């Protein structure tokens, strides 16, 4: 499914993206000095991207409403990531209440050829922009979530792990004039 | 490769951040140019790994027009002109980063410098990797065409 959609979208050299992203993170570190601020800024930028990206996602993927939050998790991991970044993620640790899951990224184009200096390890969440994208995109489909990086391979941990917690389902008001 | 929309939305955010992070436009353009320089410099390094060293400036410029531009935008530069004294004019009739900007011919505000400055930096960075220091300026033509001039 994700592969089909990925084949449909127009593509660009991922090295350009990786290097540009890296240059931006470096710039942010220079501008802010405080690493926590950099994490926040990256998340905010991601949010702005997510709220726009969802539209293309819905248009191109032809995916309807998800039955529950767990289906949403699978769609993000298998279709969302595949469609935009060309990689898939794995969903683990779903809680019984179906309000929380973890995304494991085995492959992440953002961190190709990246190495973090010692002093930033476990402090900087280099790919934090992804958390913002997920939060922004889900908010547009009435799900308010909290998204955090739990582990990052750049900080010598075994995998990249994003935790997504559903906080609230926003009321689904259909604007006047829409069916 | 990754989806183009992914890069474009990111690009908009990046430009927006840089423009807001500086008090005046000129400073922000400089920053964008610098970022582009870094990226172009590293990108071309990987692209030209198997290319023998250029003996002439023109060869390097041709590499930019064909290989470099193609790697970035899946199309080469449409037209290359030179006065044979070191000035080159490259035109891209459909510059991708301008494709999705709304274009209003009646508007007085046609300034989209911030979306092109980064690309100027890319060219500069790539050329510097080949050992040529250059200045890149650009001119916007109608319908998303863009001309880069460099010395």
Image: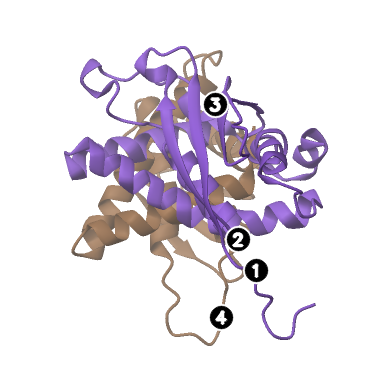
Q: Is residue A10 visible?
A: yes
What residue is pinned by disc 2? A142
Residue located at (44% from left, 58% from top): B115
Q: Is residue A97 left or right of residue A74?
A: left
Crowdedness near tag 2: few (<14), some (14–19) or many (≥20) residues, C-alpha within 10 Å: some
For the N terminus of chain A, the image quarter is top right
Residue A34's label in the rendered image is none
Q: Earlier in the sequence, mark 2 or mark 1?
A: 2
Q: Tell me where residue B64 appears, x and y as whole percent.
A: 52, 36
- Residue at point 32% right, 40% down? A39
**Are the residues under marks 3 and 1 on the same chain?**
yes
Q: CA distance from mark 3 to mark 2?
A: 27 Å
**CA gap, disc 3 to disc 4?**
38 Å
Residue position for label 1: A172
Badge 1: residue crowd in 10 Å (few <14, some 14–19, many ≥20):
few
Which image quadrant is residue B39 in? top left
Task: Specify the quadrant of the image occupied by residue A154.
Answer: top left
Letter of the brown chain:
B
Seen from the viewer's position, the closer of residues A15 and B87 is A15
Observer-nearest of B130 and A36: A36
What residue would you read off at disc 4? B104
* Residue B61 seen by the camera: no
Kindly identify which residue carries mark 3: A108
Q: Secondary structure at mark 4?
A: loop
Q: Nearer the viewer, mark 2 or mark 4?
A: 2
């Amino acid at each position: 499914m994700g592969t089909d959609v990925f084949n449909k979208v127009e593509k660009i050299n991922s090295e350009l993206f990786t290097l540009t992203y890296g240059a931006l993170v470096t710039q942010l570190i220079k501008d802010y000095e405080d690493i926590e601020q950099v994490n926040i800024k990256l998340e905010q930028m991601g949010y702005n991207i997510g709220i726009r990206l969802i539209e293309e996602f819905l248009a191109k993927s032809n995916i309807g409403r998800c039955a529950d939050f767990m289906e949403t998790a699978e769609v993000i991991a298998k279709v969302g990531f595949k469609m935009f970044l060309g990689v898939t993620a794995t969903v683990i640790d779903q809680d019984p209440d179906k309000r929380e899951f973890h995304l494991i990224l085995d492959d992440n184009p953002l961190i190709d050829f990246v190495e973090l200096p010692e002093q930033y390890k476990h402090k900087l969440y280099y790919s934090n922009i992804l958390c913002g994208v997920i939060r922004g995109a889900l908010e547009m489909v009435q799900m308010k979530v909290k998204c955090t990086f739990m582990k990052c391979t750049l900080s010598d941990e075994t995998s990249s792990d994003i935790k997504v917690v559903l906080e609230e389902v926003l009321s689904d008001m259909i604007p006047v004039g829409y069916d | 490769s990754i989806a183009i929309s992914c890069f474009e939305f990111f690009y908009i955010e990046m430009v927006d951040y840089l423009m807001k992070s500086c008090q005046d436009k000129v400073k922000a353009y400089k920053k964008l140019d610098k970022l582009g320089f870094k990226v172009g410099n590293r990108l071309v390094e990987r692209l030209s790994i198997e290319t023998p060293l250029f003996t002439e400036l023109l060869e390097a410029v041709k590499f930019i027009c064909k290989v470099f531009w193609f790697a970035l935008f899946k199309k080469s530069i449409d037209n290359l002109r030179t006065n044979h004294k070191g000035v080159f004019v490259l035109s891209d009739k459909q510059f991708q980063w301008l494709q999705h900007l709304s274009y209003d011919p009646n508007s007085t505000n046609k300034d989209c410098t911030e979306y092109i400055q980064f690309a100027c930096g890319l060219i500069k960075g790539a050329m510097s990797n080949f050992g040529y220091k250059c200045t890149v300026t650009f001119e916007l033509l109608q319908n998303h065409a863009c001309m880069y001039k460099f010395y």
